[in-house]
Image (cartoon, rainbow, N blue to C red):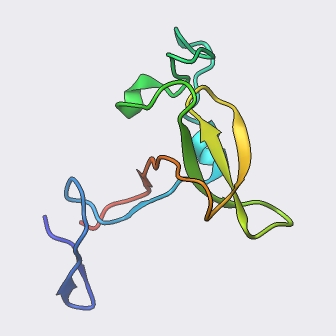
Amino acid sequence: MSCASDGGAITGCFANYCDWRLPSIAEFKGIINLGQVGCGTDTGTCIDPIFGPTQFGYAKYWTATTAEGNSDNAWSVMGYGTVYNLNKTSNNLYLRAVRSGSCR
């Protein structure tokens, strides 16, 4: 499989897909499983394990959703399910990419 745009190859693809992006806050909340063993602890995670390895506990992940009323901030989700509104430029958080289709 190859991905192309305007006749040229796209670089930066992963697993043969080129449509990766940050999830919205609603999408990210959709992968949270509060009933998961270890959820809510500093050594556990509430992100469903079907989505692969996850930083546990206090690790925070960016979403693509800008905070309403403050374009300098975006929503983030902590590994154990808590949602935060944080400054986009002064916080180094993890990323979890999602995709919504293929380039086939």
Query: Looking at the picture, does residue 6 appear above or below residue 104?
Result: below
Which of the pair 94/27 is nearer the observer? 94
Q: Residue at x 59, y 14 (%)?
A: 41
Q: How many marks?
A: 0
- Percent across and percent down for residue 23 are 54, 53
- Percent across and percent down for residue 93 are 52, 48
Which of the pair 41/22 is nearer the observer? 41
Query: Looking at the picture, does residue 87 appear above or below residue 103?
Result: above
For the N terminus, which image quadrant? Answer: bottom left
In the image, 2: left or right of 24?
A: left
Query: Looking at the picture, does residue 4 appear above or below residue 74?
Result: below
Query: Looking at the picture, does residue 62 appear above or below residue 4?
Result: above
In the image, 54: left or right of 28?
A: left
Q: Residue at x 53, y 11 (%)?
A: 38
Q: Residue at x 50, y 57 (%)?
A: 22
Q: Residue furthest bottom?
A: 6
- Percent across and percent down for residue 90 are 62, 60
In the image, 26: left or right of 28?
A: right
Q: Residue furthest top?
A: 37
Q: Residue furthest left?
A: 1
For the C terminus, which image quadrant? Answer: bottom left
Q: Residue furthest right?
A: 69
Location of residue 66 (image quadrant):
bottom right
Location of residue 7 (image quadrant):
bottom left
- Percent across and percent down for residue 92 are 53, 52
